[in-house]
Amino acid sequence: MQVILGASGQIGRELAIQLKREFTSEIRLVSRRPHKVNDTDQLQSADLLDAGQTLRAVEGAEIAYLTAQVDVHMAHAGEAAATGREEVAA
């Protein structure tokens, strides 16, 4: 199983096409609102800023490709808000 995180973007879509054409039909597309690129794609909705959702999305994967633009500062701010910690400037 190949997993593409951020599959709704242009890079994710192109990667899905190439993987199917040249390597495998076992592809899981992951994004907030995933759409099939190939007829055999598996779809999984996930917020990549949520560690639990991301771990579930890559479960069973041989390879996971991160094609999403993830704002690390936003991820840390969300984590700080969830735990009640104050954000420390990097």
Image (cartoon, rainbow, N blue to C red):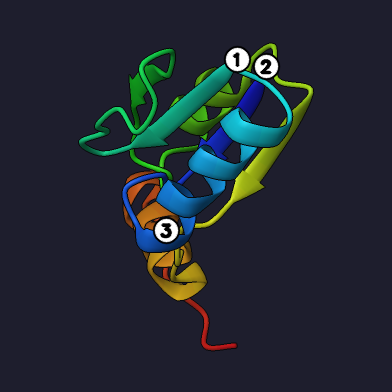
Left or right: 30, with 32 as reference point: right
Q: Are marks 1 and 3 in contact (CB under 8 Å)?
A: no
Q: Residue at x 64, y 45 (%)?
A: 65
Query: Of residues 13 and 77, which is closer to you in this image?
Result: 13
Extreme residue toward the left, this view: 33
Residue denoted by label 2: 1
On the image, the x and y values in percent for residue 29 come to 43, 30
Residue denoted by label 3: 80
Kindly report the distance in space between the C-alpha atoms of the residues bearing marks 1 and 2. 5 Å
In the displayed structure, 4 sits above or below 55; it is below
Residue denoted by label 1: 26
Residue 42, quarter of picture: top left
Residue 63, quarter of picture: top right
Structural crowding at the residue carrying mark 2, measured as other residues with C-alpha within 10 Å and reported as few (<14), some (14–19) or many (≥20): some
Structural crowding at the residue carrying mark 3, measured as other residues with C-alpha within 10 Å and reported as few (<14), some (14–19) or many (≥20): some
Disc 1 marks a residue whose amino acid type is Glu
Point out the tag, 1 or 3, that comes first from the N-terminus. Answer: 1
Report the number of discs: 3
Extreme residue toward the bottom, this view: 89
Left or right: 3, with 50 as reference point: right
Disc 2 marks a residue whose amino acid type is Met
Q: Are marks 1 and 2 in contact (CB under 8 Å)?
A: yes
Point out the tag, 2 or 3, that comes first from the N-terminus. Answer: 2
